[in-house]
Image (cartoon, helix red, strand yellow):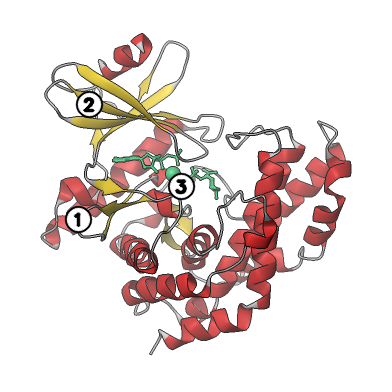
Amino acid sequence: MEHIKHVIGQFVLNGEANKILPIVRGHINTTYRIIMNDGKQYTLQTINTNVFRKPDLLMDNIVAVTNHIQGKIKENGGDVDRECLSVVLTKTGASLYRDAIGQCWRMYGYIDNVKSYDQIEEPIQMYNAGVGFGRFQKMLAGFPMDSLHETIPNFHNTEMRMKALFLAAEEDAVGRVAEVREELSFFEERKEFATTFVRMIERGALPLRVTHNDTKVNNILIDDVTNDALCVIDLDTVMPGLAAYDFGDAIRYSANTAAEDERDLSKVGLDMELYEQFAHGFLSEVKADLTETETRYLPHGATMMTLENAVRFLTDYLQGDVYFQIHRPKHNLERARCQIALLKSMEQQFDAMCRIVDSYLI
Ligand code: ADP
Ligand code: GN1
Ligand code: MG
């Protein structure tokens, strides 16, 4: 706690921290809610530099993206402090503080009177999340994409993710490969599919846009009173990407009938009502901007992101759990199995997924 107080002291704030409350969410960063003695609140985060190798460039992205979004919110007469993250600078004017052991810290204003769900409770929340992520993409449409640093190269290159998995299986660093033969053969059968978006980008069939790339529903803050999607957070992976990534990852995470790490696979599947709600909300914001091919490939985004996360969880399991935070010994294996079950359910319902997207294009 003393160290955290020292870190807080490096940022341009008045007074002292009264309470420091850990927020246990996400698999990557460590987050604290800070309540100062004057009642003002902030979010303090360590940036996981094992995942984000160039934190200074990452923060340059976030400062530029939040400035751009704040400009758009002002144009629309919105509330800049609640609808966008605001970076708090250090006393030396930097957007991150590097402590004596090299840990990197950043601070944002804390947005109060909001909820962020790990799981959707009512279908309307899924519609609102669709509107929120769609609007986020729309607000960034005029952002100079080439100025963005690629915070994790090849983040959604599913073909490369697949290669990394088979390499990890070959190396078998912690002796777990025998346990996952069935999963590996499931992935073997989908190697070709994993190349779909990579090839389409190469031949210019799908345009790159500024996308969020990590559209889990707990990365959007929901207003307590109105239930509207208020603010999109977790901007570390804002990079050039495909509309289908943002659509697809939100479906993967939030339209699952169970949690991302459910062990009882009979509970796992794609909830078509939640899928439809998200599609409706998302398309109401972006359909006018997307090309016909982009809209047609949104459902493939859902299967691709589910495959990709399954592959990434299993790779991490084979490598000894070095990337995602885990809360039990086989957590990554359980996550991978859950994503495989979800993917099977999506594959069975794929035609209906396409029909639903089509029905909201009119
Ligand atoms: P991670 O990369 O670990 O997922 P996030 O940036 O998503 O980290 O933050 C984790 C959680 O902290 C979020 O799901 C949200 O509940 C909460 N949170 C983060 N930033 C804010 C903020 N500015 N205001 C309120 N809550 C926040
Ligand atoms: C991580 O940071 P968080 O928990 O929102 C991961 C995503 C995965 C997700 C799976 C930078 O997201 O790519 O889809 O876990 N973020 C990073 O739950 O790797
Ligand atoms: Mg998050």
- Left or right: 126, with 68 as reference point: right
Q: Earlier in the sequence, mark 1 or mark 2?
A: 2
- Left or right: 217, with 256 as reference point: left
Q: Is the CB of mark 3 within 8 Å of ligand 2?
A: yes
Q: What residue does disc 3 label?
A: 237
- Left or right: 51, with 238 as reference point: right
Say the numbered circle drawn on residue 225.
1
Mark 3: amino acid: Thr
Say the numbered circle drawn on residue 35.
2
User: Disc 2 or disc 3, which is closer to the eye?
Assistant: 2
Q: How far apart are the two marked residues, 1 and 2, measured between alpha carbons?
A: 22 Å
Find residue 64 and report its horizontal and vertical position in percent.
Answer: 30, 45
Identify whether 262 is placed above or below 127. Answer: above
Identify whether 104 is placed above or below 264. Answer: above
- Left or right: 83, with 359 as reference point: left
Q: Earlier in the sequence, mark 2 or mark 3?
A: 2
Mark 1: amino acid: Val
The answer to whether residue 205 is seen in the rendering is no
Instruction: Look at 32% across and 72% down and name the residue there.
Output: 285
Looking at the rendered structure, the secondary structure element under dot 2 is strand
Looking at the rendered structure, the secondary structure element under dot 1 is loop
